[in-house]
Image (cartoon, grey):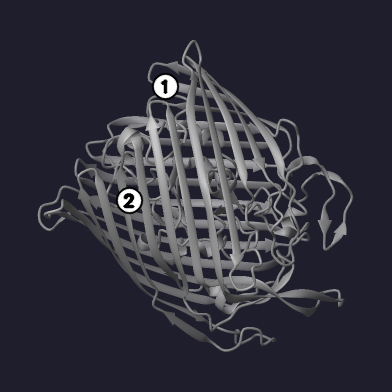
């Protein structure tokens, strides 16, 4: 838990209003706050509680500016319980408590973020970090509100592309960044304004980076050592984003729309001659009405459509495989008026969520057929507030179906078989409570059961997955994945001192894992040479995960400089319950120690991050060495009139230590260690 590194005015009136829903408490100046410290978490909190019943971290304002990286995964890596899939510097997805892929729900302003990042580790998340105003991370299951894809947690990126509150006048910000281990040149500009209830928003962003610079290491490809180098080959990238939005708003609600576009061309680390050209276009409509009379006091909706395409381009310019997806989502939510009971006030919310995803992959490297996924969920959450304590219970019922088109009619090879369809009926439920104790202490607890329908690739994959160097085979007979979760939390805060601890356990009845079968599949390449690839199959196995997260903060010196110390520790263990074999790619124990000093407009910070060696690894993997990295940063806040500029310098990996990510796939880990010593300069100007 930590507070703001810089205390400053809100970025803009509309952003402040949007992010301070329900209470008016501004969290834009928060650094990396562990709810419930001075901020209201929007994600997974439809009743607007001051305290989150679920472990949550919020990044916004100066704290987000200091952590901001080229990918969403790298921006969040190192937060409590959060790691990164780390498939090179251009494609890194968040990993929460050891779970990734289709068990972590990525949201864009509370709606589905449709891309192909869950299908393969080399596919980047289609979100531009530079224009994001706030990121909320929920650790642990949130399937009740967002479906079984949130078994492990939720990451919600929030901007103000659909202005939620009435604006009067003009505001904006611009941010420029230079340097870093990838020689980054990046910039973004956000402009907002409004009058008489009409509001508008516009933003643009661009980022260009070179091959990642690292401490000297020996890359390993296909089991063979390559010449030692200080660069990660084919890891450069070039991305651009832009959006416009408008709304009408008054004191009781808003209605509006926005369109945005994102393009990202980047190298694939494990394929030295392949570049991915990604394109994503999104349209969203949203609205909310508050302070209603009758049975419902508040209603809101979100309707969105996303078109996604990426082409994998060979070194000679030929287009190999082309991935396409079109996603649509409708979300309706209504909060009923408070009901008085003998024990206290009962608050609740009812909701409907419907999603569609049409996916296709055309080309030699396509290992999944064209599919159509449909799901509809109904959910209800009720909360009883008994004095300062609260108890909640919820239920979600879903209906989903996944259809494979099978082999194309003109296909020369019978690869995916005939068209087929599977139907599922997942159900999820949870109970939770929060109890304030004396002396600044508080206790939270949650217990739940989650069901997740298998993803299209878990059911129907059948082919060579080049990024992983394996032959992947799905299982169309897979059943709904079932898990049970328990989370206990204890927190304390007095003045500048705070402590938070969470312990959790998850038991899967049938964890859908991609396991090695021991078989070798022979494939003939374009050159006519035969190669043997290990076969991996999606199988349902019993599994368990458990761990804890501990954080603390204290004020050491008050004058003439304030000096704060913070520390964090997280530990995770996961195993196949039947065989005892470790689950793949789990982060090792991690310890973080930090110091932050401040006086007037000046700030400075130092952070030491230690990751233990990971000696528990799954079949086909190897141990990952531990590492210790030192990061330093300094900043100056310049103010003039109604504007300000935040100038920062950040030195990463000060001792230039070689470090590898245990959460990354081995093929990427052998080719792309973490960045070496690098200096980043940035300025953010707010008007």
Instruction: Depth check: give the residue in front, 434 or 563.
Output: 434
Q: In this view of the protein, can residue 182 be seen by the observer?
A: no
Image mark count = 2
- State the image quarter where residue 87 is shown: bottom right
Residue drawn at (11%, 54%) of the image:
342
Q: CA distance from mark 1 to mark 2?
A: 33 Å
Q: Point out which mark residue 643 bears.
A: 1
Horizontal and vertical percent position of residue 218: 85, 49
* SS type, badge 1: strand
Q: Is residue 596 above or below residue 96?
A: above
Residue drawn at (87%, 76%) of the image:
529
Q: Quadrant of the C terminus?
A: top left
Instruction: Depth check: give the residue in front, 33 or 646.
Output: 33
Residue at the far front in the pictured view: 438
10 Å crowding of disc 1: few (<14), some (14-19), many (20+): some
Residue drawn at (30%, 30%) of the image:
169
* SS type, badge 2: loop
Q: In this view of the protein, can residue 52 be seen by the observer?
A: yes
Q: Is residue 116 above or below residue 287?
A: below
- State the image quarter where residue 409 is shown: bottom right
10 Å crowding of disc 2: few (<14), some (14-19), many (20+): some
Q: 72 left or right of 672?
A: left
Q: Point out which mark residue 45 bears.
A: 2
Instruction: Depth check: give the residue in front, 147 or 238.
Output: 147
Q: 263 left or right of 110?
A: right
Horizontal and vertical percent position of residue 484: 44, 66
Q: 62 left or right of 264?
A: left
Residue drawn at (22%, 36%) of the image:
196
Q: Is residue 399 above or below residue 157?
A: below
Horizontal and vertical percent position of residue 552: 49, 35
| Mark 1 or mark 2: whose residue is earlier in sequence | 2
Q: Is residue 597 above or below residue 326?
A: above
């Amino acid at each position: 838990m930590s507070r703001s590194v810089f205390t400053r005015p809100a970025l803009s009136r509309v952003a402040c209003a949007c992010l301070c829903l329900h209470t008016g408490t501004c969290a834009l100046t928060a650094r990396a706050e562990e709810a419930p410290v001075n901020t209201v978490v929007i994600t997974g909190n439809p009743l607007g509680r001051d305290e989150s019943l679920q472990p949550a971290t919020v990044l916004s304002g100066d704290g987000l500016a200091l952590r901001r990286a080229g990918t969403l995964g790298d921006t969040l890596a190192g937060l409590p319980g959060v790691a990164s899939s780390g498939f090179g510097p251009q494609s890194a997805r968040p990993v929460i408590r050891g779970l990734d892929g289709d068990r972590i729900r990525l949201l864009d302003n509370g709606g589905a973020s449709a891309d192909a990042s869950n299908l393969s580790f080399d596919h980047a998340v289609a979100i531009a970090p530079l224009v994001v105003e706030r990121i909320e991370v929920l650790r642990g299951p949130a399937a009740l509100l967002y479906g079984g894809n949130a078994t492990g947690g939720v990451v919600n990126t929030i901007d103000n592309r659909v202005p939620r509150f009435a604006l009067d006048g003009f505001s904006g910000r611009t941010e420029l960044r230079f340097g870093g281990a990838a020689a980054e040149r990046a910039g973004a500009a956000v402009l907002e304004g409004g009058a008489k209830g009409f509001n508008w928003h516009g933003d643009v962003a661009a980022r260009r980076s070179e091959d990642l610079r690292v401490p000297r290491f020996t890359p390993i490809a296909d089991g063979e050592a390559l010449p030692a180098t200080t660069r990660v080959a084919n890891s450069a990238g070039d991305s651009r984003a832009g959006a416009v939005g408008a709304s009408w708003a008054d004191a009781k609600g808003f209605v509006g729309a926005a369109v945005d576009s994102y393009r990202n061309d980047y190298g694939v680390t494990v394929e030295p001659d392949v570049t991915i050209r990604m394109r994503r276009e999104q349209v969203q409509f949203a609205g909310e009405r508050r302070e209603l009379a009758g049975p419902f006091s508040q209603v809101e909706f979100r309707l969105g459509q996303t078109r996604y395409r990426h082409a994998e381009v060979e070194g000679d310019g030929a287009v190999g495989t082309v991935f396409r997806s079109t996603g649509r989502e409708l979300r309706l939510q209504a909060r009923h008026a408070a009901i008085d009971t003998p024990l206290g006030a009962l608050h609740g919310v009812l909701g409907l969520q419907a999603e569609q995803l049409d996916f296709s992959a055309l080309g030699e490297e396509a290992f999944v057929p064209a599919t159509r996924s449909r799901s509809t969920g109904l959910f209800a959450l009720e909360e009883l507030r008994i004095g300062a304590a609260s108890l909640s219970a919820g239920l979600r019922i879903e209906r989903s179906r996944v259809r494979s088109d099978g082999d194309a009619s003109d296909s020369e090879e019978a690869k995916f078989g005939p068209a087929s369809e599977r139907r599922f009926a997942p159900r999820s439920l949870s109970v939770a409570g929060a109890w304030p104790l004396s002396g600044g202490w508080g206790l939270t607890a949650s217990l739940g059961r989650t069901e997740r329908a298998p993803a299209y690739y878990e059911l129907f994959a059948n082919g060579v997955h080049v990024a992983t160097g394996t032959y992947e085979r799905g299982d169309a007979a897979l059943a709904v994945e079932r898990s049970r979760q328990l989370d206990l939390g204890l927190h304390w805060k007095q003045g500048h001192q705070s402590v938070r601890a969470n312990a959790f356990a998850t038991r899967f009845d049938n964890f859908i894992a991609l396991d090695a079968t021991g078989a070798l599949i022979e494939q003939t390449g374009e050159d006519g040479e035969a190669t043997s690839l290990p076969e991996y199959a999606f199988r349902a196995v019993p599994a368990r995960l458990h761990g804890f997260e501990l954080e603390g903060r204290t004020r050491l010196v008050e004058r003439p400089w304030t000096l704060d110390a913070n520390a964090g520790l997280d530990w995770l263990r996961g195993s196949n319950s039947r065989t005892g074999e470790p689950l793949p790619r789990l982060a090792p124990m991690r310890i973080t120690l930090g110091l932050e000093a401040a006086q007037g407009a000046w700030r400075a910070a130092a952070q030491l991050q230690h990751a233990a060696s990971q000696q528990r690894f799954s079949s086909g993997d190897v141990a990952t060495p531990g590492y210790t990295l030192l990061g330093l940063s300094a900043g100056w806040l310049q103010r003039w009139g109604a504007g300000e500029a935040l100038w920062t310098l950040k030195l990463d990996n000060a001792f230039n230590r070689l470090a590898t990510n245990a959460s990354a796939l081995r093929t990427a880990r052998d080719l792309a260690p973490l960045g070496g010593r690098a200096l980043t300069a940035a300025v953010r100007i707010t008007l």
